[in-house]
């Protein structure tokens, strides 16, 4: 479904990714691991179109989308939950969720019931402004907003950052549900190793802008993986 092929990415004269390749398939969770500053977020920004890639290409369902703007990628079924959530603080919870309709083509727009089944707290706060929610509630809102867009892949950048343990469990259950019940592809950047290890079907470890180790879930406990994650 998603294939990142030998991608370089730069910010001006500063190159941050070198020859990065990665795949994410339907019904699987692919976790990208690594210390701060190794290029994980830049990789996601290149995939969703927030930053242009240099060499290499981003393939989606067999087509090169490297030159498409972000909204066109969203219309093709790519949903992004960025680091820091980036919900609209002055819009209500309902209005934030309804922004997910923007990438849908025609038809009746309705917030899926499964959003509230996975995150019941959102249903009780529909009229509350997004900026008044706690960090954990905002993270649930950001994931719910992505679900409204009915994506084929959900890309999440550190969804557990600064979140209380009870909400981390809710987020983990939601990600597993989307993989299992909707055969959605999940691409997850995460620093919380235990959370990633519990969810991942496949993983890739980044260091200094490159993928240095990758494999299936059984290889995540290898010492060669852990050495790239410790400070």
Image: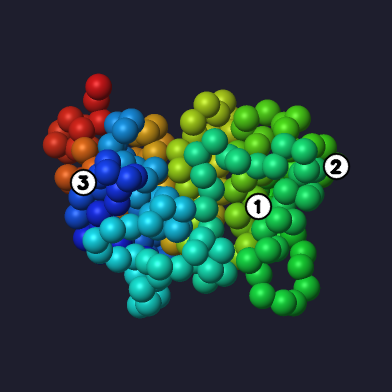
The quadrant the N terminus occupies is: bottom left
8 up-or-down from 184: above or below = above
Number of the label disc, if any, that sits on residue 127: 2
The quadrant the C terminus occupies is: top left
Q: Are marks 1 and 2 in contact (CB under 8 Å)?
A: no
Q: CA separation, marks 1 and 2?
A: 15 Å
| Secondary structure type for disc 2 | loop
Number of the label disc, if any, that sits on residue 204: none
Using a 10 Å C-alpha cutoff, classify the residue at mark 3 as few (fewer than 14 neighbours), some (14 to 19) or many (20 or more): many
In front: mark 3 or mark 1? Answer: 3
Residue 59 drawn at (x, y percent): 35, 70
Q: How is the image coloured?
A: rainbow
Left or right position of 76 against 201: right
8 up-or-down from 65: above or below = above
183 up-or-down from 36: above or below = below
Q: CA separation, marks 3 and 2?
A: 44 Å
Residue wearing tag 3: 210
Residue 169 drawn at (x, y percent): 54, 36
Number of the label disc, if any, that sits on residue 145: 1
Residue 81 drawn at (x, y percent): 53, 48
- Pointer 3 or 2: first along the chain: 2
Residue at 53% over, 68% down: 72
Residue 197's quadrant in the figure?
Answer: top left
């Amino acid at each position: 479904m998603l294939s990142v092929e030998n991608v370089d990415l730069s910010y001006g004269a500063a190159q941050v990714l070198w020859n990065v390749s990665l795949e994410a398939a339907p019904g699987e969770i692919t976790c990208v691991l690594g210390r701060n500053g190794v290029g994980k977020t830049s990789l996601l920004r290149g995939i969703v179109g927030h930053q242009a890639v240099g060499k290499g290409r981003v393939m989606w369902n067999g087509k090169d989308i490297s030159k498409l703007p972000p909204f066109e990628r969203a219309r093709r079924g790519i949903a992004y939950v960025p680091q820091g959530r980036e919900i609209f603080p002055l819009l209500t919870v309902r209005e934030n969720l309804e922004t997910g309709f923007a990438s849908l083509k025609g038809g009746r727009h309705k917030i899926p019931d499964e959003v509230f089944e996975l995150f019941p707290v959102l249903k009780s706060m529909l009229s509350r402004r997004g900026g008044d929610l706690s960090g954990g509630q905002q993270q649930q809102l950001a994931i719910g907003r992505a679900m409204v867009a009915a994506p084929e892949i959900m890309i999440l950048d550190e969804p557990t950052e600064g979140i209380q343990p009870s909400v981390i469990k809710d987020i983990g259950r939601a990600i597993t549900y989307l993989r299992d019940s909707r055969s959605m592809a999940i691409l997850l950047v995460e620093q919380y190793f235990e959370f990633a290890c519990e969810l991942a079907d496949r993983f890739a470890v980044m260091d200094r802008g490159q993928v240095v180790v990758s494999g299936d879930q059984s290889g995540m406990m290898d010492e060669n993986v852990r050495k790239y994650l410790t400070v």
